[in-house]
Image (tube, rainbow, N blue to C red):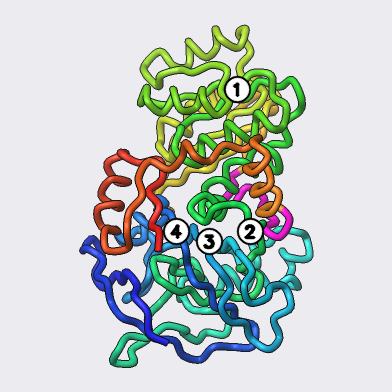
Amino acid sequence: MKFKAAVLSEFRAPLKIETLGLTQLADTDVLVRVRATSLCHTDLEGVEGNLGVPLPIVPGHEAAGVVEWIGRSVTRVQIGDHVVMSWNPHCGECFYCARRQPILCESYRANAAKSYHFDGRHRLESECGAPVHQLAYLGTFSEVCVVEERCAVKVPNEIPFNRACLLGCGVMTGVGAAMHIAQIEKGATVTVIGCGAVGLSAVQGARLAGASRVIAIDRQREKLDLAAVVGATHTLVADDSLVASHLTLTHGRGADCVIEAAGTRAAFRASAEMVRLGGQVVWLGKLPTNEELAFRWGSLMGEKRIVRSSYGGADPWSDFPWLANAYLDGSLKLDEYVTSTIALKDVNIGLSRLSAGEDIRAVIEF
C-alpha cells in the first residue's frame, strides 16, 4: 500500500508531502484510514526539535478514522469501525499499569523516544525503503496510520470525524484534568489559566463536574469570549493585577482548584498564588525538561496540593466513547474549537497559524 504523509526530515524546516509504504505489520496492529487529524502544540514542539524525536518522522497525534485492516490477534475493533486514536499504548501488566497509571507504563516510556512501536520495529518506510518514525506512536499527518490495538478506540459512528479527532489529546487532557485528577466537588470554584484547546476543555470539565463558578484566564479577549461560550462564569485578563483581581473575585480565599493550561512560568507561579489554602492545583502545561522554575515559598504553604498531569488520567476505552456521546447530546461543545479546516498539503500553514496563536484547532480533513 502506498499513501501520502507529511514528513519532517529537518527540525524547524517545512514538512514535505511524501509517498510512504507499509512494512512489518504485526498481529496486534490496526491500520486506520485517517479521515481527520487536528494540529496540537505537541506537534509543533516536535517540528521545532523540542521533543528530541528521531528523523524522519510523521507528526500528528489527534486523529479519527476508519479501521481498514486488523492483525490476527486483534479483538477490540473490527474492520469498518470508527475510531479515535490514543497516543498512550500501555502493556497493562507493569508496575504502573497494575496501579492504574497507564500514562507511566514502563514500556510506553522506554520506547517513546524511539518513535517506533513497542517491538522496536518501524511500520512506515520511504519509497527507497528507509524507516520513517511515528510521533507519539501514531503519526497521523498521513492518509493512513498504523497503531497498536489499544490505541484505536471505537466511538459512535454519528460523531463527525472532524470533531471526533479533537477527543484524542487536548479535550481528553482538559476534561480529564477536571473530572479525574482534580476530582472537583459540586459547587466548587475552579480557575483555569490558559484558554487554548486544553484550557477550554478544562473549563468544560469543571462545568460538567458541577462547579458553581468557573473562572477563565487568558491574555486574549477572544479566547475569554470563547471560554464564556463553553462554560466559564467569569473571565479575567492575565495582566499585572491578575492575582489581586482573582482574590477579590474569590472572596479573599482563592479558588478551590486551579488548573494551569498555559505552559508559561507566569502561569505556573500564578496557579500557586491563586489556589486557596488546602486547595488543589493541576498543572497541564510544560516547560523544556531541563529548565528551572522558581516560586515564592509562601505560595506553596497552607496544605496546598500540586499535581502534574499529561493526559488527564485518561482511560481512553471508557473516556473517548463518553466524550463522543457528550458531544452528541450537546453537553460537550466541540464545534467552537475548530477555527480552520485545511488539506494535508497546507499543514505548514496550519503549524504557522498555531505557533502565532491564530487557531484553537486547525483540522486536516482527508
Question: Looking at the image, do the residues carrying marks 3 and 2 touch, with CB atoms under 8 Å apart?
Answer: no
> For residue 1, which quarter of the picture?
bottom left
> Which of disc 1 and disc 2 is earlier in sequence?
2
- Secondary-structure class at tag 4: strand
Question: Looking at the image, do the residues carrying marks 2 and 1 touch, with CB atoms under 8 Å apart?
Answer: no
Q: Amino acid at mark 1?
A: Val
How far apart marks 3 and 2 lie (CA) works out to 11 Å
Whether residue 313 appears in magenta in the rendering, the answer is yes
Residue at figure coordinates x 55%, y 11% from the top left: 247
From the viewer's perspective, is the residue at label 3 or at label 2 nearer? Answer: 2
From the viewer's perspective, is the residue at label 2 or at label 1 nearer? Answer: 2
Question: Looking at the image, do the residues carrying marks 3 and 1 touch, with CB atoms under 8 Å apart?
Answer: no
Q: Is residue 297 visible?
A: no
Q: Position of residue 241 (x, y in %)?
A: 40, 13
Local crowd at mark 1 within 10 Å, few (<14), some, or many (≥20)? Answer: many
The circle on residue 61 is none
Q: Is residue 90 visible?
A: yes
Residue indicated by mark 4: 37
Residue indicated by mark 3: 64
> Which of disc 4 and disc 3 is earlier in sequence?
4
Whether residue 227 appears in magenta in the rendering, the answer is no
How far apart marks 4 and 2 lie (CA) works out to 16 Å
> For residue 54, which quarter of the picture?
bottom left
Residue indicated by mark 2: 157
> Which of disc 2 and disc 3 is earlier in sequence?
3
